[in-house]
Every structure is written in structure tokens, then in C-alpha cells.
Image (tube, rainbow, N blue to C red):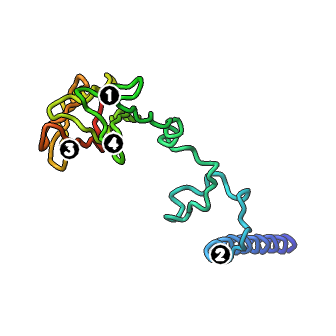
Amino acid sequence: MRRLSSRGRSEAALAISVIALVMALGGIGYAAATIGTSDIENGAVTARKLHRDAVRTNKLKDEAVTGAKVKESTLGRVPSARRARRLSAPEPYREIGTPGEPPFKNGAQNFGEPFSTAAFFIDHEGVVHLKGTVRATTFTVIFTLPPRYRPNQQLFIPTQATSVSSAVYVYQNGDVQVRGGSGATNNYALDSITFRAG
């Protein structure tokens, strides 16, 4: 009789243990299914409580992280920005007819105030820029560009000469020639003429 009583108590204890385990597991599942974002107190989940790599890119909502939330000092520099920091200012204009620069040829000269003077420079991309208004005889070379500033093909560039359509030719040897106009001597605009050297 004692054996039967002891066995009954053991079975009852086992049954109670199984029921308790099922209820505990069910409670965890219930809690996981019913606790939402609104149930978590602000600041309760800190960085130390997150598993490493728990939050990945594919788990973030689009546009969830804005510029205001990013610490700029943690960002690397964009490659083009690194290059931009190394760039120096382009060389200044090289004025035609001044000491150390190409001289005017065939009687050409600056038109005078208030118009810009004839000059040139090359930028970091290898593009040559001209400027100025020049008084010159048509079909003459007005100056010659140094070797570094010359095109590798002959250039025909439309321009204005004393309010009449004309042209500037730039040759591979650096000669800059003016053509056209209403008379023998005209005023030629070089402003905004650009071309790639080389």
C-alpha cells in the first residue's frame, strides 16, 4: 500500500512539473507575441544590451537614419573630396605683352579700357582659357602661345570683330590668328574661348 501511495505521489509531482513547464513556455511565447514597441520604456534598450551585428542594414526602415543622427567624425572622406583638398588654385592669367610673357605680333594691341586685356591660362584639367579684346589687322597672327598651351589640332573659333561675325584660328604651333571683319583693322573678342591643350 505504501508503494502504491508513493508511486501516486511521484506521478502527481511529475504531472504538476509538466504542466508548470508548459505554462512557462507558453507564457514566454505569449509575452514575445504581445510585447510591442509601445510597451518598451524609452531608454530601456541601450547599446550594451544589443547583440553585436543584431541591427543590420536590411532591418532598418528606409530613411530611418537621417544626417542629424550620424556622427560626421566617424565618416570617411569621399575620394573626390580628398583630391579636392590637394588641389591648389589655378595659375593666374598670363598677360600678353607683359615682361616674361608672349609679345603681341603684327601691330596687335589691347583695345583698352574698359575692356579686358588679352591673356591666357591653363586649368587643372588641361583646358586653356583666353580673354581680352584686341585691336588687330585682319588675317594676321596676334600672338603665339607657349608649347604647353597649344592644341593638337587646328581650331576654328567664331567670334565678333567690330560688331561683325569673324573668327579666331588657333594652330598647333601656338599661333593665334584673327580673320574677318568689316575693315583692315578690327576689334576682336577673345573672351570665353576655351580649348583642351595637347
Tell me how far mark 4 sits from mark 1, CA to CA. 25 Å
Horizontal relation, residue 10 to residue 54: left or right? right
Q: Which mark is residue 149?
A: 1
Q: Nearer the viewer, mark 2 or mark 4?
A: 4
The type of residue carrying mark 1 is: Tyr
The quarter in which the N terminus is drawn is: bottom right
Q: Check disc 1: other Cα within 10 Å, few if <14, some if 14-19, many if 20+.
A: many
Q: Nearer the viewer, mark 1 or mark 3?
A: 3
Of residue 129 and residue 35, the one placed in the foreground of this image is 129
Residue at left 34%, top 25%? 102
- On the image, numbered disc 3 is attached to which residue? 159
- The relative height of residue 144 versus residue 44 in the rendered view (above or below) is above
Of residue 46 and residue 80, the one placed in the foreground of this image is 80
- On the image, numbered disc 2 is attached to which residue? 35
Tell me how far mark 2 sits from mark 4, CA to CA. 83 Å
Q: Is residue 198 visible?
A: no
What is the secondary structure assignment of the residue under circle 3? strand
The type of residue carrying mark 2 is: Ile
What is the secondary structure assignment of the residue under circle 2? loop
Residue at left 35%, top 29%? 97
The quarter in which the C terminus is drawn is: top left
Whichever of labels 4 and 3 marks the residue nearer the N terminus, that label is 4
Do labels 1 and 2 touch, CB within 8 Å? no
What is the secondary structure assignment of the residue under circle 1? helix
